[in-house]
Amino acid sequence: MMSHYLLALASLCVLFSIGYSQENVAAGVRATQSTTFIHFADANNAIDGNNDSEFRHSSCSSTMKQRNPWWRVDLKEHYRVLVVRITNRNRKAKRLDGAEIRVGDSLENDGNRNALCARIDSIPRGGTKSFFCETQNGVHGRFVNIFLRSRRGILTLCEVEVFGIHDPH
């Protein structure tokens, strides 16, 4: 546990030293998802700036139960994404276990074939966890997807924040 803490602390120091944005670049843009469970589970709820983890409070997104559910935010511009921070709902936390965070410019297969940023091992009930893109320089792209590969499930996100460096090409 201590080694994970030290690694996260060292990663944060590196990120600040290279000047990554401390602003959530997913704020104020639009999101979409493969399906919508009910009217108050819209994809945009996951980027509304409210990390309330109680699903009934209408601040979480949710797909219906389906094979390979996905959620995507369009950042509108190209970024070098370094960190994605996700808040899980306060119940049924294991639904996010094994999900992939993918970043890129392609919408082929709904963007789920873009480069892998990180895999979600687990996020505690109602908890928020930061995922650092696995490559030292981040992953480049306009779209950030969260994707449950090769399984039938429900994808619920209470908040998604994206941090990186604006990278126009």
Image: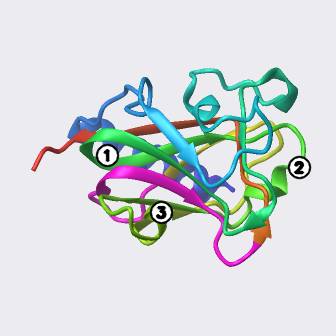
Q: Would you say residue 22 sits in the magenta stretch?
A: no
Closer-to-camera residue (3/108): 108
State which tag comes first along the sequence, 1 or 2: 1
Residue 23 percent location from the top left of the image: 37, 25
Q: Nearer the viewer, residue 127 or 43?
A: 43
Q: Residues within 10 Å of mark 2 (few under 14, many from 20)?
A: few
Q: What residue sits right under mark 1 in the picture? A: 14
Q: How many residues crowd mark 3 within 10 Å: few (<14), some (14–19), many (20+)?
A: some
Marks 2, 3: nearer the viewer: 3
Direction from residue 135 to residue 151 in the image, left or right: right
Query: The residue tagged with tag 2: helix, strand or loop?
Result: loop
Residue furthest left as drawn? 169
Q: Which residue is mark 2?
A: 92
Identify residue type, mark 1: Val
Residue 96 vs 88, above or below: the answer is below
Q: CA distance from mark 2 to mark 3?
A: 25 Å
Looking at the image, residue 87 sits to the left or right of residue 25; the answer is right
Residue displayed at 72% across by 33% down: 60
> Is residue 164 at least partly visible in the picture?
no
Q: Is residue 7 in sight in this rendering?
A: yes
Q: Amino acid at mark 3?
A: Asp
Q: Is residue 91 left or right of residue 152?
A: right
Name the disc covering residue 138, or none.
Answer: none
Question: In this picture, is 35 found above or below 51?
Answer: below
Residue displayed at 73% across by 42% down: 88
Q: In this picture, is 41 found above or below 48? A: below
Q: Which numbered disc, 3 or 1, marks the residue closer to the eye? A: 3
